[in-house]
Image (tube, grey):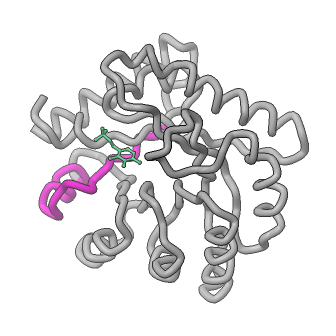
Amino acid sequence: MIADNIKSVTERIARCCEKAGRPRGSVQLVTVTKEASVGQMEEVFHAGARDFGENRVQDALTKHSAIGDKVKWHLIGHLQTNKVKDAVKIFSLIHSVDSLKLAQAIDKEAAKLGKRQSILIQVNVSGEESKFGIAPEETIDFLKVASAYPNISVDGLMMIAPEVDDPEAVRPYFRRLRELRDKIDEGRRAIRTLSMGMTNDFEVAIEEGSDIVRVGRAIFNDQ
Ligand SMILES: *Cc1c(COP(=O)(O)O)cnc(C)c1O
């Protein structure tokens, strides 16, 4: 059941934090609802979930009109410039910014709403062609430009690990994103948040320093 699954994921996160010597509350769970119905979303809300992740703006708008702002909405999927206006209306955090053109469009729409939009930069750490995201070595230059936009706040970095059977195999990718973040923090552009880890690999991601895990299947599928 959904409530049991949320409880079990939350406990796994807590145990993992303990094992990694991190405070229990230092990792945020975003419940990925892209395949969930509004009814199921109400169910996870009652079980304590307060952050929902969607990968399509249109689906999120429909669900947002039913559920509203009692939860925080996270955009985790690729964002097209023509959807930015709607995205800025509802999302607290856009995890998937992968071009300066997009960052600029978000800045412009946020200005119109009098909002400062929090974003993460999606980095394609594994370099897979199928994945969105900027190359790791472009990140610092990207940040220099993006941090000059007054209506966005670049809070950190996001990545999606390759799909593998053994989560240990993707540990080096998580580590690489953390090292990139740390390197940026040594400079003057402090960014803190690392959004990494999904159903298959969130425990390894937490051990490597993740601050936000995005979990769908472990919550909505019967395991
Ligand atoms: C679907 C999705 C998730 C959740 O994946 P699960 O394997 O269902 O936990 C996390 N992040 C992104 C970007 C996704 O598209």
- Magenta stretch holds residue 42: yes
Over which residues does the magenta segment extend?
28-45
Snapshot quadrant of residue 42: bottom left
User: Which quadrant is home to the N terminus?
Assistant: top left
Taking the image as shown, residue 128 lies to the left or right of residue 194, namely left
63 and 96: which one is in front?
96
Taking the image as shown, residue 120 lies to the left or right of residue 186, namely left
* Vertical placement of residue 147 versus 86, above or below: above
Name the residue located 43 percent from the left edge and 32 percent from the top edge: 162
Q: Residue 120: x, y in percent?
A: 61, 53
Name the residue located 13 percent from the left edge and 28 percent from the top edge: 223
Furthest-right residue in view? 188
Taking the image as shown, residue 67 lies to the left or right of residue 1, namely right
Snapshot quadrant of residue 214: top left
Name the residue located 79 percent from the left edge and 61 percent from the top edge: 147
Q: Quadrant of ligand 1?
A: top left
* Vertical placement of residue 136 versus 42, above or below: above
The tally of labels here is 0
- Magenta stretch holds residue 82: no
Q: Residue 81: x, y in percent?
A: 53, 76
Name the residue located 45 percent from the left edge and 16 percent from the top edge: 169
Q: Residue 100: x, y in percent?
A: 69, 66
Q: Residue 83: x, y in percent?
A: 46, 78
* Vertical placement of residue 44 versus 73, above or below: above
